[in-house]
Image: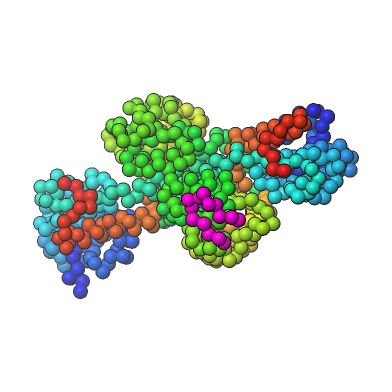
Amino acid sequence: MGSISVLLVGKVLPYLEQELDKRYNLFRGIDPSQRAAVLRDHAASIRAVVASSSGGPDAALIEALPKLEIVSSFSVGVDRIDLQKCKEKGVRVTNTPDVLTDEVADLTIGLILAVLRRICECDRYVRSGNWKKGDYKLTTKFSGKTLGILGLGRIGAAVAKRAEGFDCSICYYSRNEKPDSKYKYYPSVVELASNCDVLVVACPLTSETHHIINREVINALGPKGVLINIGRGKHVDEPELVSALLEGRLGGAGLDVFEKEPHVPEELFGLENVVLLPHVGSATVETRTAMADLVLDNLEAHFLGKPLLTPLV
Amino acid sequence: MDSELPALLVLGPPMVFKLFQSHYSHKYRFLNAFSSHLPLPEFLQTQQTHPSSVRAILCNPRQPVTADVIRSLPSLGIVATTTVGADHIDTAECRRRGIQVVTLGSQFAPDVADMAVALLIDVMFKISAGDRFAKKSIHFKPWSFPSGSKLGGKRVGIIGLGRIGGEVAKRLEAFDCIIMYHSRNKNPSVSYTFYSNVVDLASNSDVLILCCPLTEQTKYIVNKEVMLALGKDGIIVNVGRGALIDEKELVQCLMEGEIRGAGLDVFENEPNVPEELFALDNVVLSPHAAAYTLDCFMDACEHVAKSLDAFFSSKSLIISPIT
C-alpha cells in the first residue's frame, strides 16, 4: 500500500500523520501553496484525501483529482467537504462518529457548569490571591434549569441524558420533530431560545444551519440565557454574539469553536461570563487516537475492497 | 412601626444575611450583634432592647451561641442557623430551656453536587486551563490534550454518601460512571459497592470525591497512603472540608505526579491556599463556593423565614428541628 498516494488537507493528530506517512505515499496539502505544488505534480495519482474540521476538499479540489476514490475525515463534522460533488463523482466519504460522542457530551456539561458557576473565574480568583480580600460573588445554579438542544442527534441526546441527572428539563429543536422523544419540541430556534435557560448547539453545519444563532435567537435567549457552542463556529453570527455579550443582552457563553479558528474574538477575553476553549471537542488523546484509527481503518478497508466502517457517502 | 416587629438577634453574620435582610426587613427588627465588640447585654442596651424581648437568634459558626448567650436571654425560644451542623450552638442548654434549634436541611446539596461534578470535568478535560490558554492570544496554537478518556466507565469512590454524596452519585450515574462509596455505615438502600476501608476504596477507584463532614474520625481521611493507592491516574475532588485531606501531602503528590489532578473547593487554612498549586494546570481551585448560588441562598433564607414565621405565630414547627 506504500505506493497509494494520499493527500492530507486538514490538521490532524500527529499520530495519524505519522501512520499515513508509514502506510501510504503521503502528500501534505494543508497550506494553499503546498497544496498547489502537490497538485501540479501529483494530481493524477491521488486516490484518497484525508480531511479534518480545519480543512476538506471542496468541489474544485475534487474536480482536480481524477483518480480520487475516497475522502476520510478526521472529524464528525463534514462541512468542509463538498458531499454533493463526492456523490456525483462516486467518491466515498467517511467520518468518525460515535467514538467522540460521550467526550463531547461530557465536555458540554463541563462548559455549562463552568459558565453558570464561574468555575474558571473562581480559579482565577484564588490564584490571584483575591480570595484573601473576600468571598467570590454568588453564581447561578445549574440543577433544575431548562436546557434547549439544537439538534437532537447522538451528541444532543447524550447531553440531554446527562442533564437529566441534574433534574434539568429538556427541550429541543431539530429539522423534524422526533416522535419517540420524551423531550419537548419547539418548531423554531427562536421559540426554543425563548423557552430555555441554556441553549446548546449540537447540530451539523450545513447551508441551512449557517448562522442559525443570529441576533433574533440571541435576544430571545436573553440577559439570563447562556449559549454553548460545541458545533461549528459558523453556526453562530459571531459579531452579533460578541456585541450581545458586551451589551449584556446575553447572559453568558461557553464556546469551543469560532467562526475563523484559530482566531478568537479578543473582546471576550475579559468577560467573566464567557468560557473559551481552543477547539478541544473530542477532548482527549485516547479519543483522538480512536478517531485516527477509524480514519486508517476506513482507508484500509476501502483499498482492500472491504466494506467501509463509517461511510457517509 | 419598628418596635412592633419582632426582634431578631443576629450573630455571625450568616453568609446569606445581606440577602435575608434585603428580603425580610419588613418582618423583623434586626439586632446586628455581629457588628459590635460589646458584650451582649451592653450591645442590647445600645439598641434600646431589653434582653427579655429577644426571642429569636439567627446565627452561623462565626459567632457561637454559647450557654452564656442563652442564659442572658430569658425569653429565647428559637435559634436558627444557616448551616447543617449545629456545633456552634450549645444544644444541651437549648434542650434544657426548651429552645428550638433550626438548621438547614438539604437545600444546598444539589449546588454542592453540581460543584463536585464541575470540578471533576474541569480537571479531566482541562477546562480552566483551556480557558486560560484561549484567552492569552487572539490566535490559539495547538493545544496539548489531556490523556485519560471520558467519564463513562470511570470508577468514582464517594467518601460520605449522605445528601450531598447521594446527589453526586445520581449525577455521575448519568455519565455512566461506576459508583462506589465509603461511609461510617453501609447503606442498605443503595446498590453501590461499599468499602469499609478508604485505602481499598482508593485502590479500586479512578476518582475520589469527598462529601463527608469533618469530624475527629474523618480528619485527614485522605492521607498519603490513600493518595498512593488512588494512583497516578487518579483524581481527587474535595467539596467537604479542607482538613479531610492532608494538604501538605496532597501538594507533594500533585507536584510529583503521584496523582493525576485535583479539584478543590476547600482548604485547610482558608482563604490561604498553598501557592505551589498556582503553577499547576492539573488543579482547579475554588474559593469555598460550592453552595454560593443565588438560588441556594434564597432557599436558605426562605427556610429560615418560614421557621421564624411559624415560631412567631406559634404554629407547630415541623421544619428540621433538633430536639
Colour scheme in the image? rainbow
Residue positioned 64% across, 34% down in the render: A289
Q: Position of residue B22 (x, y in %)?
A: 32, 65
Quick check: can you spot residue B86? yes
Query: Furthest residue to the right?
Result: A41
Magenta span contains residue B147: no
Q: Nearer the viewer, residue A216 or B209?
A: A216
Measured from the top left, where is residue B299 in percent x and y? Answer: 32, 56
Instruction: Name above or below for residue B315 compared with residue A82.
Output: below
Residues shaded magenta:
A175-188
Q: Farthest residue in the bottom direction?
A: B1
What x and y, as percent, mark residue B265?
Answer: 41, 44
The chief SS type of the magenta part is loop
Please report the residue visible at 36 percent of the width from the left and 40 percent of the height from the top: B165
| Camera-nearest residue between B193 and B244 | B193
Viewport quadrant of the N terminus of chain A? top right
Residue A309 vs A194, above or below: the answer is above
Question: In percent of the image, x 50 and y 40: which residue is there?
Answer: B123
Q: Residue at x 34, y 37 (%)?
A: B161
Kindly indicate the quadrant of the structure image that contains residue A214: bottom right
